[in-house]
Amino acid sequence: SVEPAAPIGTFTFVVVSNRLPVDFEEAPDGSTIWRTSPGGLVTALEPLMRSSGGAWIGWPGVADCDVEPFENDGISIVPVCLSARELEEYYEGFSNDTLWPLYHDVIASPSFHRETWDAYVTVNRRFAEAAMASAAEGATVWVHDYQLQLVPRMLRDARPDLVIGFFNHIPFPSYGIYAQLPWRKQILHGLLGADVIGFQRLEDAGNFTRAVRRLYGYPTRGVVIDVPTDTRQTRRVVAKHFPISIDAAGYEEMARRPEIQARARQIREDLGNPKTVILGVDRLDYTKGIGHRIKAFGELLADGRLSVEDVTLVQIASPSREQVGSYMALRDDIELAVGRLNGDFSTISHTAISYHHHGYPREEMVAMFLAADVMLVTALRDGMNLVAKEYVAVRFDGDGVLVLSEFAGAADELKQAILINPHDIEGMKDAIVRAVEMPRRDRTRRMRALRRRVFDHDVAAWSASFLSALSGGAAVKAGISDALGA
Ligand code: F6P
């Protein structure tokens, strides 16, 4: 057996992600509050962590927060502390001003700064060390997302006993875009430390494999990449798509609660009981196409194809990455557009866009999904978009119409949505009108098919298929079997 070179922990399953499932917050009286943190990653992993008894390594959401490991709601939490400077350079800088725009097809311009790259390396090492200190010999460590792409290699070099998985929650760009990254080889090298590298879409896995061929020339066969080792052998790395999902049954259960249904009715009433409620729910991010959506809606009101007497657009824009320049500019643009549109079209009794720059508890979101006749997901680029799946899971009544961008990963699966190209404003306007006017029978037929897909491929199925590929990888490593059938 291999002698581990680094400290050893006690957990046989360890998840590593930039953000913990809970964010640290200090109450006015000085006590600590732990709040559920934003984003799809947490929603997806929470159920698995609760059932596996593993450790979750991550950042508690504020700078200089030195907290001891603790247990939260059945999950062992191991906080990784980041200084204000590291946050600025690793999180706001390299992760969210370089990698995020680059991986989302340069919708905003990525910045390339050597100092922020150095911080990315330093912080990735801290996460890797924390993971090693938690992981028992032979443990499975599952690393998540673009903020931590160097961690798999760091783990493999120090702890060859570990089984290492990596899942990328966001798109992986085509080679022409990826090649812009000055550290493109280092990132690939980092990722190739994993046994299995998971992506959302087939296309993302293909882009990654092509980048490996172009930049390293390693042989690839289908989903398998042969990576040379120091000992002149090869390691087999699997790069494959595993579309992420949600706890569909959990969402439906919430939607069936009488108090949540009452809240949904209340929401419609508070909006003035419009004939149609259209809903958008996004982090306030330039990838989500919120501006395109507002433009289309405004033109429909101006053209008289929709009227504020009949239709209200509720837009939830949850605060995100507020220290990053492109996000500050986006907020100004969106709020200017909302203000103008409301100024032009709202009446004393009817507001055109009910806009909310807040995050909401899950129960409130479920009530909003129930209250919404039409759900707009108009992302310009999105790894998956779990909001689309949440809307579908909630609609046990078989009603509701999903308008979905073909540039969201979810479009590969949710084919019975009304699929749109959000850059085509005329096309989006037609799709919105079609959704508003769709007869009940068509709505039900589509929603039934969408629900079948989401319930058959829920988050438990997602993690099971990733982890079974990963344990297949371990078996291959141990020379037991080729469970991957490659
Ligand atoms: O999946 C994309 C992602 O960046 C996650 O990694 C993250 O938890 C979520 O979106 C929210 O972003 P942030 O952690 O930067 O607020």
Image (spheres, helix red, strand yellow):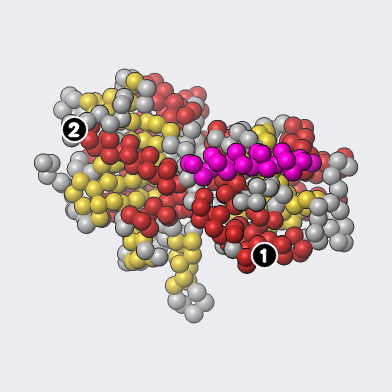
Where residue 150 sits in the image (x, y, percent)?
34, 41
Give the prevailing secondary structure in the magenta stretch. Answer: helix
Between the C-alphas of marks 1 and 2, the distance is 55 Å
Q: Is residue 122 visible?
A: no
Q: Over which residues does the magenta segment extend?
A: 437-457
57 to the left or right of 258: left
- Label 1 Cα neighbours within 10 Å, binned few <14 / some 14-19 / many ≥20: some
Residue 295 lies left or right of residue 194; in this view the side is right
Number of residues whose C-alpha sits closer than 10 Å to that of mark 2, classed few (under 14), some (14–19) or many (20 or more) = few
Which of the pair 292/86 is nearer the observer? 292
Query: What label sits on residue 480 in the rendered view?
Result: 2
Q: Is residue 401 visible?
A: yes
Residue under label 1? 263
Which residue: 52% across, 77% down? 28
Label 2 sits on a secondary structure element that is loop
Q: Which residue is painted at 46% across and 53% down in the image?
A: 42
| Image spot of residue 400 (x, y percent) | 69, 47
Residue at image x 46%, y 62%? 23
Q: Quadrant of the C terminus?
A: top left
- For label 1, being within 8 Å of ligand 1 is answered no
Rendering quarter of residue 382: top right
Q: Amino acid at mark 1?
A: Arg
Please, is residue 4 above or below residue 105 in the view? below
Q: Against 111, is 63 above or below? A: below
Q: Earlier in the sequence, mark 1 or mark 2?
A: 1
**Residue sitting at 87 percent across and 57 percent down?**
347
Corner quadrant of residue 79: bottom left
The reply to whether the magenta stretch includes residue 142 is no
Instruction: Estimate the x, y position of residue 98 in percent, counting from the top left.
Output: 49, 40
Q: Amino acid at mark 2?
A: Ile
